[in-house]
Amino acid sequence: MNREFVDKMIQAKQMEMEAIRCLLPEPVRGHMDVISREFKDMARDMAKEVVFSCCTGSEKSGGQETEHRTSKVDIE
């Protein structure tokens, strides 16, 4: 993706959040700040996990892979 496009999209979303924040009552703004920080932390953690799994080449899987066996069947 084009770096300039990504930068502009991020700036647009930041301006959108600022505009919404201005419309909210003061007590709610504090909650929005906390939610915003938590979301940024979560996104950072997810990005680190993706980079780590791509660099190590490992994927987390929920279960073990089982070997599938087939046998020939004669139909008469």
Image (tube, rainbow, N blue to C red):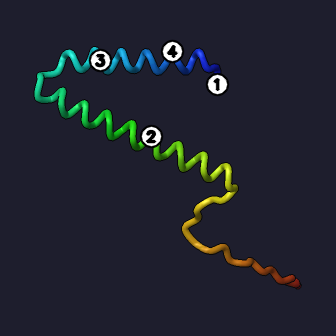
Determine the residue positioned at 23% across, 31% down. Answer: 32
Disc 1 secondary structure class: loop
Q: Decide: is 50 above or below 75.
A: above
Q: Which residue is tagged 4?
A: 8
Q: Position of residue 74 (x, y in %)?
A: 88, 84
Mark earlier in primary sequence (1, 2): 1
Contact? badges 1 and 3 (CB < 8 Å)? no
Q: Decide: few, some or many residues near mark 2? Use Cα within 10 Å; few <14, some 14-19, many ≥20.
A: few
Q: Decide: few, some or many residues near mark 4? Use Cα within 10 Å; few <14, some 14-19, many ≥20.
A: few
Which quadrant would the C terminus be assigned to in this image?
Answer: bottom right
Marks 2 and 3, how far apart in space? Answer: 19 Å
Q: Which residue is tagged 3?
A: 18
| Residue nearest the observer in this picture, 52 or 61 | 52
**Where residue 43 is drawn, which disc sits there?**
2
Contact? badges 2 and 3 (CB < 8 Å)? no
Res. 42 image quadrant:
top left
Q: Nearer the viewer, mark 1 or mark 2?
A: 2
Specify the amino acid type for callout 1.
Met
Mark earlier in primary sequence (1, 3): 1
Q: Decide: few, some or many residues near mark 1? Use Cα within 10 Å; few <14, some 14-19, many ≥20.
A: few
Marks 1 and 4, how far apart in space? Answer: 12 Å
Q: Which residue is tagged 1?
A: 1
Specify the amino acid type for callout 4.
Lys
Disc 4 secondary structure class: helix
Q: Position of residue 16 (x, y in %)?
A: 34, 17
Disc 3 secondary structure class: helix
Mark earlier in primary sequence (1, 4): 1
